[in-house]
Image (cartoon, helix red, strand yellow):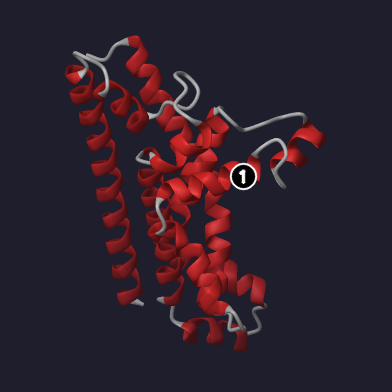
Amino acid sequence: MLTPDEWTIVLLSLKVGAVAMVVTLPIAFAFAWVLARWRFPGKVLLDALIHLPLVVPPVVTGWLLLIAFAPNGPIGGWLMNWFGVSVLFRWTGAAIAAGVMALPLMVRAMRLSIEAVDRRLEGAARTLGAGPGRVFRTITLPLSVPGILAGAVLGFARSIGEFGATITFVSNVPGQTQTLPLAIYSALQQPGGEAMVWRLSAISVALSLAALIASELLARRAGRGLHVL
């Protein structure tokens, strides 16, 4: 059984992962749509920048977020001056770090789903008088939904496992930014913390495994749907 403090850690991790996924979802879809359907100079560079968090050390991403969201940073200063808020050392900052790290995986899954939609179906709908908006709502989006959901679930799984960028950006504050990976790291540094490590690791593995299975099932469903069409 988990202790009250451990339940707090689990619930905070779920909140951070859910908020990161929900906020990142429309951004990821917009990027996926642009990469899948548009052609423009610098597309390769945009693709590389979106996927950069996958290859650079997470602490570098966290450091860049710290610079951007610091009280005197370009984004942090604006938030402080206009709204009087700061995301440093708060769970909202942890959600930002998790969302940034999850973005590339979400974009990749959604882009593949959009690219798999048969353009001939969209062309046929336009010849029948459907405008671009209606084609998107009635054909493109429904056929892309399983892939979009798969990307969202994959992003959630990545968010609850985020460590390097989070600890660099918002530190390891119990009750505020101490998610499952950070709590496991802290327990490893404490004498007699092995039992806590086992419990939190089991929860973390179970959540991640469930999310990965759900993502795979959704991806297969998308593939079957497109194959039938």
Going 17% across and 17% down the picture, which residue do you hit?
195
Image quadrant in which the N terminus is located: top left
Residue 34, quarter of picture = bottom right
Where does the image place residue 216, in percent across and percent down from the top left? 27, 56
Where does the image place residue 180, in percent across and percent down from the top left? 34, 29
Q: Nearer the viewer, residue 32 or 52?
A: 52
Whether residue 146 is visible, yes or no, is no
Going 63% across and 71% down the picture, which residue do you hit?
134
Q: Nearer the viewer, residue 119 or 175?
A: 175
Q: Nearer the viewer, residue 85 or 71?
A: 71
Where does the image place residue 72, in percent across and percent down from the top left? 73, 39
Q: Is residue 54 above or below residue 76?
A: below
Instruction: Report which residue position mark 1 lands on.
Output: 67
Going 28% across and 37% down the picture, which residue do you hit?
207
Q: Is residue 25 above or below residue 136?
A: above
Image quadrant in which the C terminus is located: bottom left
Give the left or right position of residue 67, taking residue 103 as reference.
right
Going 32% across and 23% down the picture, which residue do you hit?
186
Give the left or right position of residue 83, taking residue 139 as reference.
right
Q: Is residue 170 above or below residue 158?
A: above
Residue 189, quarter of picture = top left
Q: State the SS at label 1.
A: helix
Give the left or right position of residue 22, taking residue 129 as reference.
left
Q: Amino acid at mark 1?
A: Ile
